[in-house]
Amino acid sequence: MERRALLRIGVAMIVAGAVGWRALPLRDSKLSADSSDASAKGLSDAQTDPATAGDRARDGEATVSREPDSAPAPDPVTDPDRTPDPDPEPAPQHEHEPEPEPAPAPEAAPQHESQPLRVEVICREALGLAAPVGVGVIHTIDRMMLHHTAVALGDNALAPQRLRGHQRYHQQQGWPDIAYHYGVDLRGNLYELRTPDWAGDTFTEYDPAGHLLVVCEGDYDREQPTDAMLQATAEILAYGATVHGADPQRLTGHRDLAATTCPGDHLYARLDELRVEVLRLATAPLTLDLVCGAQAQARLASIEGA
């Protein structure tokens, strides 16, 4: 009897002990799960609510940091243990890509010899000037001077007739020929007058010996020189500078050496331009072409009939 009672008591204690052992883990698991849910919920709130994340951090919650997936590649500039390859291998060449052929060299432009400037001058015989009277003063040209006739021209068709009239008047003064060596009209026609071997003449006090005299037909205190006149004047002066060695920079107007308004205010105002153009033209080859005979007569007919 006592043995049975003791056996029952032992079985009961074993059963009670087993029941108690299984209940405790269940309560711990529930608390652990609740605690895990709360922690997860709190972490989720902190991640989605920036306004409360800082408060939780201040309350002592641990912050989560994430390490990079891999270490960054070393920088050859900042990493002392890495040095760049001083002689990198060239990139491989693909056999199917042919080397480009060099472009052919451009052909040199053909060189042309500089053509001389032809300065056409109507000869004095075609103009109708009379033969010289007597002999002029022989001289050597080393300077050039610009004149005007001081008689308004107006119509350029009058230019050849005016030049013939100037010669008659000058010879009446006892001079051997018209006073000037070359004449120019408004349209840029050039005329041969006195031979350059003889010094010119003047009614003023300067000595014309050594000067090449070029006269522009007209009164350039009242008239304006044309571009054609100025260009032809520059060409005959450039020829004179080339043949006689006269310095274009020493080109003067009549008024520079005598008490006169010649060659007129409007023409004198263009003297600097003429010097520049004469200097430019004198650097190139020039030839003087005297136009005589039938060709000159046709030219004069065109001028006087215009």
Image (cartoon, grey):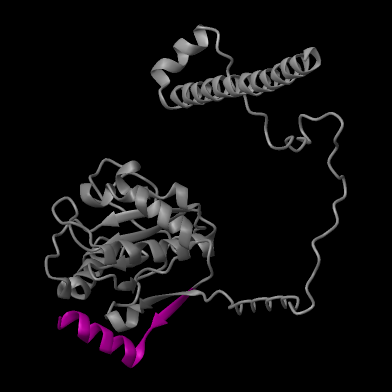
Q: Is residue 58 above or below residue 218?
A: above
Quarter of the picture containing the N terminus is top right
Q: Position of residue 158 (x, y in %)?
A: 15, 73
Q: Which segment is the magenta one?
A: 287-306
Residue 292 belongs to magenta span: yes
Residue furthest to the bottom in view is: 294
Using residue 277 as the reference point, say whether residue 297 is left or right of it. left
Q: Nearer the viewer, residue 69 or 305?
A: 69
Magenta stretch: helix, strand or loop mostly: helix
- Count all numbered tags in the image, as a single digit: 0
Residue furthest to the top in view is: 59
Give the residue displayed 50% in from the left and 52% down from the top.
Answer: 247
Quarter of the picture containing the C terminus is bottom left
Q: Nearer the viewer, residue 207 or 88?
A: 88
Q: Position of residue 216 (x, y in %)?
A: 27, 61
Q: Position of residue 283 (x, y in %)?
A: 53, 61
Q: Nearer the viewer, residue 107 or 97?
A: 97
Give the residue displayed 51% in from the left and 25% down from the top.
Answer: 37
Using residue 84 as the reference point, say whether residue 59 is left or right of it. left
Q: Nearer the viewer, residue 47 or 139?
A: 47
Give the residue displayed 46% in from the left and 13% down from the top.
Answer: 54
Residue 115 belongs to magenta span: no
Which picture quadrant has residue 52?
top left
Give the residue displayed 28% in from the left and 80% down from the top.
Answer: 127
Q: Position of residue 305 (x, y in %)?
A: 15, 83
Q: Is residue 260 above or below residue 284?
A: above
The reply to whether residue 244 is in sight is yes
Q: Is residue 6 above or below residue 262?
A: above
The reply to whether residue 174 is in sight is no
